[in-house]
Image (cartoon, helix red, strand yellow):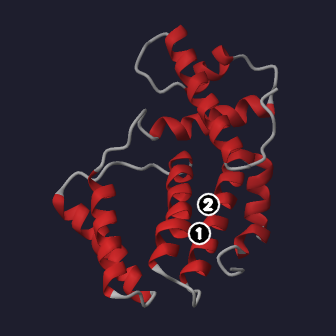
Amino acid sequence: MGSILGFLAEPWFQECRLQRPVTAALLEAISTKMAAFIELGNSDTYTLEKLNSDLGCLASEIAELSPWIVGVKPLTNEKQVRERVASWVEFARDLGLPGGQIAEISKSADRTSRTRPRGRPPDRRRLAVKAYEMKAANHKLTWEAVTEALCDCRKSQHDEYCKESLRQVVMTLQKTLRKHGIVVPPLG
């Protein structure tokens, strides 16, 4: 598990923790879950039941956290869906899984690749992380000031809707962080 988490001790990551604490905490949580996923996948007690429970939970948690730091867009065409399914099937084969489990993974990857995520597009989530970090770094900042600095709408003047929209997605971020036990500086 150590090799995938080696970057946590690197100077650039330590600097990231100081400058972008929420981003760093999310990156660390995702990487830790990925390391656990790999470790579990390499275990000798790997069964379909483990795949459906432990690996499924870890994959779901990784998928829930990732859009907060990376842009995730729905796949737009059949070729992209096939490529994603093929990459998961190849990963399962590399793990040495039997054919039945590979078929299950293939079906699951196909289904999730075709399903559009519910809710606000993930690109607003990255904006929420920046807003959270701004507010946490300077507790005196108002939501109006944060919105003025970060809102990506095309309005000439940001209004109450812009402010409330950004504040709500930051509250969703806070809820997600608490759900996964990720500790970050308070908003104040």
Q: Residue lying furthest left in this view?
A: 78
Closest to the observer, 122 or 11: 122
Q: Is residue 96 left or right of residue 6?
A: left
Quarter holding the N terminus is bottom right
Q: Quadrant of residue 168?
A: top right
Q: Position of residue 100 (x, y in %)?
A: 32, 81
Residue found 43% across the figure and 22% down from its top: 153
Picture residue at 31% right of the left edge, 44% below the top: 116
- SS at badge 2: helix
- Which residue is more in the foreground, 72 or 32? 32
Q: Disc 1 marks which amino acid?
A: Met
| Left or right relative to 38: residue 122 | left
Q: Look at the image and tell me in which quarter the C terminus lies.
A: top right
Residue at the disc numbered 1: 34
* Residue at 50% across, 48% down: 67
- Regarding mark 1 in the picture, which secondary structure is present there? helix
- State yes or no: discs 1 and 2 in contact (Cβ < 8 Å): yes
Q: Residues within 10 Å of mark 2 (few under 14, many from 20)?
A: many
Q: Which mark is residue 152?
A: none
Circle 1 crowding by C-alpha within 10 Å: few under 14, some 14–19, many from 20: many
Q: Is residue 25 left or right of residue 51?
A: right
Between 86 and 12, which is closer to the camera in this rendering? 86
Q: Name the spot of residue 143 as percent of width and height, x first.
A: 67, 18
How far apart are the alpha carbons under marks 1 and 2?
6 Å
Indicate the amino acid at tag 2: Ile
Please state the horizontal and vertical placement of residue 42, each as a whole percent of the image: 56, 86
Tell me the residue at 46%/40% (across/down): 123
Residue 119 vs 166, above or below: the answer is: below
Label 2: which residue? 30
Between 174 and 149, the residue placed more toward the observer is 174
